[in-house]
Amino acid sequence: MTEIAVLPDDIEVVEALRAALSRLLPPEDLAQVDLDAVDADTPLLGLPVDSVVLMALMNELEDRFSVFIPEEEAFGFTVVGDIGALIRQRLADKAKRREQG
């Protein structure tokens, strides 16, 4: 994993999520969603994502942003922006620990 120096904004997280969805969703599910319309306010339940795809998606985002997303938190997200908020919080916490120690 590479370290992220600047906290990502919602746009960066949404773009990473869109890219991951385009790789992870089977064609029939991908046909059901307009990835360009996915934004921070998009409800996760509105996406054709089952638990297996959700975990694969979280793994890709973990690798992209060098954070750990616990399974129980992943299943608690309501909208795409919740993912970005957790990623920013984890990165801020990591930076704070580095500064302190």
Image: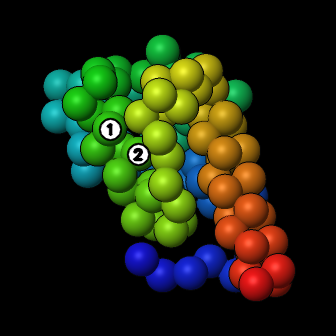
Above or below 5: residue 63: above
Closer to the camera, 8 or 31? 8
Q: Amino acid at mark 2?
A: Met
Left or right? Give the position of 17 relative to 40.
Answer: left
Q: Secondary structure at mark 1?
A: helix
Q: Position of residue 19 (x, y in %)?
A: 40, 54
- Quadrant (top left/top right/bottom left/bottom right) for the N terminus: bottom left
- Quickly name the residue at label 1: 55
Identified at 48% across, 16% down, the residue is 46
Give the numbered dot on residue 90.
none
**What color scheme is it?**
rainbow
Identified at 35% across, 52% down, the residue is 59
Q: Amino acid at mark 1?
A: Met
Q: Position of residue 26 (x, y in %)?
A: 17, 34
Closer to the camera, 87 or 17? 87
Instruction: Note whether residue 7 is visible.
Output: no
Identified at 37% across, 56% down, the residue is 60
Instruction: Note whether residue 26 is visible.
Output: yes
Q: Position of residue 97 (x, y in %)?
A: 74, 73
Question: Which picture quadrant has residue 32?
Answer: top left
- Quickly name the residue at label 2: 58
Left or right? Give the position of 99 relative to 30.
Answer: right
Above or below 5: residue 56: above
Left or right? Give the position of 58 relative to 53.
Answer: right
